[in-house]
Image: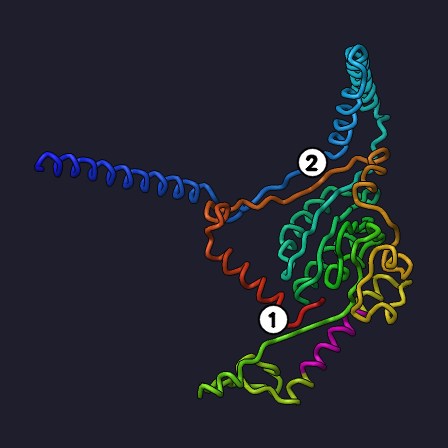
Amino acid sequence: MTEFFIEYGLFLAKAVTFVVALLFLITGIVTAASRQRSSDDDGSLRVRHVNHEIESLREDLRYEILPEHMRKAELKAQKKQDKQKKKAEKKADKDGAAEHKNRLFVLDFDGDVRASAAENLRREISAVLQVADKNDEVIVRLESPGGLVHSYGFASSQLTRIRSHGLKLTVCVDMVAASGGYMMACIADRIIAAPFAVVGSVGVVAQMPNFHRLLKKHDVDVELLTAGEYKRTLTMFGENTDEDREKFKEELEDTHVLFKDFVRENRPSLDVDKIATGEHWFGIRGKELGLVDDLMTSDEYLLKRSDDAEIYEIHWEVKRKLADRLGFSAEGIIQRSLDKWLHKNGSRWIQ
């Protein structure tokens, strides 16, 4: 029996030692990673030359569908052609006679309720504006069902920077650009949508639960103190009056007016009063109403432009903490819960 306890004690000591060592190792890795990060180094810009990918896909498929006896000859001819092309480009650069294609900068915006992708978008736009000239074009592949007014107002302001810089802006909608998403899209010189993409929804909605009667039933009082007649209108826990509701509705109407004026300013040919009913339409109907200019997918548009332009996909990649990557971030969990709550019970938002 004594030997059993000795062996068990040794085993327990080894297990504890291993766990402690593992904890020290993890702590060291996390600490080292934290030290390497600086306040300014929170991400990096990724640039992808889309033309190269399109060419690679074409050549790979072409090579595979050729009869086997023709593959070697095709590969040899392609290498010779590439060599001659590089030689010609090098000579043209040396002589100063090189003809440079126009450039297309492709940005992506995948919008949630808070338009949180605007943070990455602002960095990407800042980078593009420093190198682009008047002959270049910015394409934004936009997907969003709408969200909070102030958040999408900020995101829209980022796209306005492109127009203010004198660059052509094209927005491509493959699935949905409604409400706040359409607020962003309407800034573009040209809106391209897939035939069944959802566009429109120029309206404002707000909803809020009220627990006053429930609290009153259980003898719970809520004290709400304000300074200013309209500092607070509708509330979740206090008793709402008709006057509160009327004021809140007045604010919604004013937001809707601002939304309509914004769309009218950016798309003067559009009959805003006709489409500002809060309805949404598929791309086909949207083109008939003037909400969009052309019907095609973003892939189709980029493929067409790859013949006469150099296409660069720009993406700001945020460095995420280990906890975020593993999904253990308390902040991330809370934020996801907040997004779900806003979708159901949110304050005033464009939708």
Residue nearest the viewer, comparing 214 with 38: 214
Q: Is residue 253 rendered magenta in the image?
A: yes
Please give left or right for residue 14 compared with residue 198 in the image. Answer: left
Answer with the quarter of the image where residue 262 lies.
bottom right
Residue at 67% across, 51% down: 121
Q: Which residues are magenta?
A: 248-260
Can you tell which mark lies on residue 228? none
Is the magenta region chiefly helix, strand or loop? Answer: helix
The residue lying at 73 percent from left, 59 percent from top is: 181
Classify the position of the N terminus by image quarter: top left
The type of residue carrying mark 2 is Arg
Q: Are marks 1 and 2 in contact (CB under 8 Å)?
A: no
Around disc 2, counting alpha carbons within 10 Å, would you say few (fewer than 14), some (14 to 19), or many (20 or more)? some
Instruction: Choose the circle earlier in sequence order: 1 or 2.
Output: 2
Q: Residue 333's x, y, as percent? A: 50, 57
Q: How is the image coloured?
A: rainbow
Q: Is residue 80 visible?
A: no
Q: Which residue in the protein does label 2 denote?
A: 48
Kindly indicate the quadrant of the structure image that contains residue 244.
bottom right
- 66 or 236: which is nearer to us? 66
Q: Which residue is mark 1?
A: 345
Q: Secondary structure at mark 2?
A: strand
Query: Looking at the image, which residue is at 65% across and 55% down?
Result: 118
